[in-house]
Image (cartoon, rainbow, N blue to C red):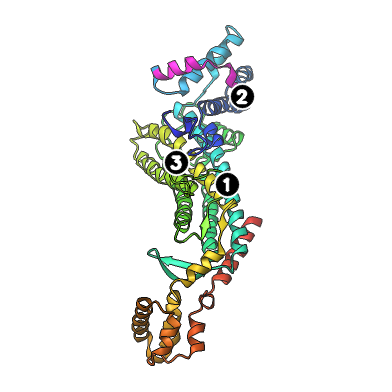
Amino acid sequence: MTSVTDSVIFGNILSTPECAAIWSDKTRTKYYLDFEASLAKVQADLGIIPEEAAAAICAHCRLELYDWDELRTQTERIGYPVLPVVKQLVKMANESAPGKNLGGWAHWGATTQDVTDTATSLQLRDTFALVSSSLDTIVNHLRTLAEKHKHTPMAARSNLQQAVPQTLGFKLARLLSTFARHRTRLCSLQSRIFLLEFSGAAGTLATLPSALALNCQSRLAAALSLTVPQIAWHTERDNIAEAGSFLALLSSTCAKFATDVSLLMQTEIDEVREPYGPERGSSSTMPQKRNPIGSAYVAACAATARQLSSALLGAVVADHERSTGPCEVEWIVLPQLCCLAHAALRHTADMLAGLEVRPDAMAHNLEITAGGVVSEAVMMGVAERMGRQVAHDLVYELCAKAREEARPLAEVLVEDGRVGLSKEEAERLCDPENYLGLSVEMTERVLRETAEMTRS
């Protein structure tokens, strides 16, 4: 094993079979051949190369015809994987009609970088189809949970301390809103990422007849279902870096959710739990444990994705019209980054699908401060009579007293004449369910807007 995508043990945990297949040698080489076949067809239609040559080229752009040992040997010798493919293609096309040199019309006007970049665009397109599907699944799960728990009270946390009450639906709606923004980002960046590269040696298409060159480029893009480039992008790698940054950002959102799940699974809190499975997250020595293993996988995937995406930003700094080194960084980084990001999404979707919510534990935890969790409500309730800062300092003092004496805050408030609250008023202000703010309304707004996005 040199990468988790190659691992028999970790391949389905820190990668996914579907994404790993996209970034395999076979798929990449298939896309090289798709480029060559589509180019030959388009150029024959335009009269740039003979019809007979295009037919011979297309007939031999089939993956099963290629000698993989020869491809490996030639790639090691030459340094790039495209020319070894083209050499075998030319040879087979020539042998199909001896003496006609039909293979000599293959790869006409193209350069290695054209084929490599186009294949990368096609692999990213396939990857982002997986990402889009996973995003839809996550959004649907979040919508279901947010709707179900929009009235379920729980403690919000600030600096790992209880802050004020909120609802679980509100907490999940914030995450839902974030994933909805990611889906918007995904839609907007597709035209910049799913981009054809066909520009020739230095990007000027000088080898083709000037009257036909751009038409050839446009038709080739259509044949491969890619966007026509405004200009060559051999060493303008912002599109690749943007794809990597998006995947890092998306997986980091998954990690934010995973972090919250891990914290809420702590024994002393126990408000949610990852989905149960026999021995899932069990310890080798402590039988009572149920570790947040899915959350751990997501965190690891996201942390590595962020590191890998920074390498793609470095690859943007390419020299002149054809770079010396930065492009090869993408060969190393993109397969791992895409597989890690898809794995993070898959684990997130699985956790949401079976998330165990414990409303009783949430209600219990809201009571452990004996009213302290709504001290802001008390402060604002008396602030109109004495000013906010004076009220803040007074309630702070009384919260400390209630905590030290292990007494309910409402009781301490009623006893202190400076506050001026009746027992009924104090109990009302100290009830967490009376201080949920607009948790429900905001959750419903997110649910409405994400429903509209789904329909559109």
Q: Residues within 10 Å of mark 2 (few under 14, many from 20)?
A: some
Q: Is residue 203 visible?
A: no
Give, as a single range, the part of the protein colored magenta: 61-76
**Mark toward the viewer: 3 or 2:** 3
Q: Amino acid at mark 2?
A: Ala
The residues tagged by marks 3 and 2 sit, at their Cα atoms, a distance apart of 65 Å
Q: Main secondary structure of the magenta part?
A: helix
Which structural element holds mark 2? Answer: helix
Q: CA gap, disc 1 to disc 3?
A: 32 Å
Residue at figure coordinates x 46%, y 54% from the top left: 262
Cβ atoms under marks 3 and 2 closer than 8 Å: no
Asked whether 449 or 74 is in front, the reply is 449
Chain-order first, disc 3 or disc 2: 2
Give the residue drawn at x 59%, y 51%: 354
Q: Please tell me which of labels 2 and 1 falls first in the chain.
A: 2
Query: Which mark is in front, 1 or 3?
Result: 3
Total number of numbered labels?
A: 3
Does residue 426 appear left or right of residue 390 in this picture?
right
